[in-house]
Each structure stands twice: as C-alpha cells, then as structure tokens.
Image (cartoon, rainbow, N blue to C red):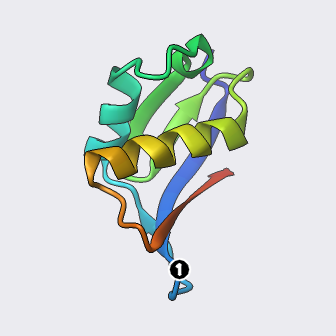
Amino acid sequence: MFARKIRVEYQDLDKDQGHPCPLKWLDSFSMRNFTNASVFDNTLPVSDGEMEIGTGVPLEQLREAMEDWFRRKGYLPKDSKLLLKEI
C-alpha cells in the first residue's frame, strides 16, 4: 500500500537549503482527514522529513494540501514553501 517514499521539506524563499518537516507536522496532517479526500488516507509519516505514500496519491495535490494545512496550523511561515520529492 505504501509503495513510494517521499522527502518532505520546507524552504525559506530567500534561502536555498531545505529543512525536514518535523514528524509532529506530518502526523498532524496524516491523522486529520480535513480534506475529505480519501486519496490522502494512504499517507504514513515515518520520521522527520519522510513519509511513505500509496501509488494513487498525487504528489502535487498532496503538497498543496499539506502546505495549506501547515499554514493554517501556524507551522509554515508565509515566506516558506513546501517541497516534496520521491526518494
């Protein structure tokens, strides 16, 4: 079910280096079905900056939903962006 591994980082817009998203953030997103999109049910936080996801999870949609959730929770500053990439 969780066939893909992804790296989840946030980056300040004025800096090049990304930082791994804390496991607390990833858990918060995965444990709360706020989107009513069942496609995000197939997400499993593993550690800081790492998740496993199902093959049917669209990466760009996931990034947008996570970025929105992190901003609403006050985790992600306005001058930062979220970066997701398969590893």
- The image shows residue 50 at horizontal and vertical percentages of 47, 46
At x 41%, y 22%, the residue is 34
Where residue 40 sits, quadrant-wise, is top right
Q: Is residue 55 above or below residue 6?
A: above
Q: Is residue 47 visible?
A: no
Query: Looking at the picture, does residue 57 appear above or below residue 12?
Result: above
- Residue 33 percent coordinates (x, y): 41, 17
What residue is rendered at 51% in x and 52% in y? 8
Drawn side of residue 13 relative to residue 58, left or right: left
Name the residue that disc number 1 marks. Answer: 13
What amino acid does circle 1 point to? Leu
Where residue 61 appears, as percent x and y from the top left, is: 67, 36
Residue closest to the eye, 1 or 9: 9
Question: x and y percent of residue 82 in the render?
Answer: 53, 58
Asked whether, in this view, residue 57 is left or right of residue 11, the answer is: right
Dot 1: element: loop
Query: Which image quadrant: the N terminus?
Result: top right
Residue at 51% x, 88% y: name it.
14
Q: Is residue 58 above or below residue 69?
A: above
Q: Residue at x 44, y 74 (%)?
A: 79
